[in-house]
Image: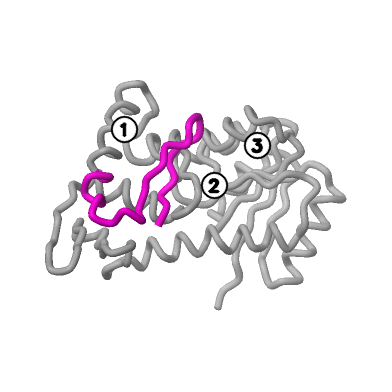
Amino acid sequence: MSKINVLLAEDELALGMIIQESLESRDFKVRLCADGQKAWESYQGQKPDVLVLDVMMPKKDGFSLAAEIRKIDPHTPIIFLTSKSQTEDVVKGFGLGANDYVRKPFSMEELIVRIKAHLDKIRVRQSQSDWITLGKYEFHPTRQLLKLGEIETPLTARESQLLQMLLENANDITDRTLILNQIWGSDDFFNARSMDVFITKIRKKLQDDPAIKILNVRGYGFKLVC
């Protein structure tokens, strides 16, 4: 099995080297960059499996770097590793397309678990050519179908994309802005209204299993509980 390729951007050199050595001792391959500009150049030279980004960095901060990457790459997991823990910072990070936000100080085991969890979601998405169990339902992303017993319900392409994204983060929050940017292409007001309509449609198509809920987490996004 090939090593997981991590691009680590951390301007505190001592901390960066500790993280690098800890990850490499667990069979990761790590490219350490001391500022956001070098990380951007490294990303362009060789796309990593996952990005771990400090927020406060010289030349290009982590938020700016993530925004540039998300313009061309909606899928590679981005994990912010930072001491900026105010709610507005977390919301901004997820709004820019981050998949996770790890606050300093942190344990290496926690970081590793989070990296592997996000890569597992990618593998699931790439291998989804069969039916996926969703409560009493079965969901086929590529055929855009929901099945309850012998009854099949067709989904539109956008409904299928939205349900798949919620399912990848089942029992966790899927960021509202991330959904809009990845599926609708922008997070403007009209797309946001459209997304709310699609959420309502999906809820109706899942209503025969009361254990499945799509919750609106105000100010953050949606949570598929199943």
Which residue in the protein does label 2 denote? 99
Residue 215 sits inside the magenta stretch: yes
Task: Kindly identify which numbered label has been placed on residue 114.
Answer: none
- For residue 132, side relative to residue 118 (left or right): left
Q: Position of residue 67 (x, y in %)?
A: 53, 34
Residue under the image location 21 percent in, 49 percent down: 205
Camera-nearest label, 3 or 1: 1
Give the amino acid at mark 3.
Answer: Gly
Q: Amino acid at mark 2?
A: Asn
Give the SS element for disc 2: loop
Question: Between residues 2 and 37, which one lies in front from this camera angle?
Answer: 2
Which residue corresponds to mark 3? 62
Percent x, y for residue 32?
72, 52
Task: Give the residues drawn in magenta, as a range.
Answer: 202-226
Q: Residue at x 26, y 61 (%)?
A: 139
Mark sitting earlier along the chain (2/1):
2
Image quadrant occupied by the N terminus? bottom right
Disc 2 to disc 3: CB gap under 8 Å: no
Q: Is residue 143 visible?
A: yes
List the residue tagged with mark 1: 196
Q: CA distance from mark 2 to mark 3?
A: 13 Å
Tell me the mark number nearer the camera, choosing from 2 and 1: 1
| Residue 125 drawn in magenta | no
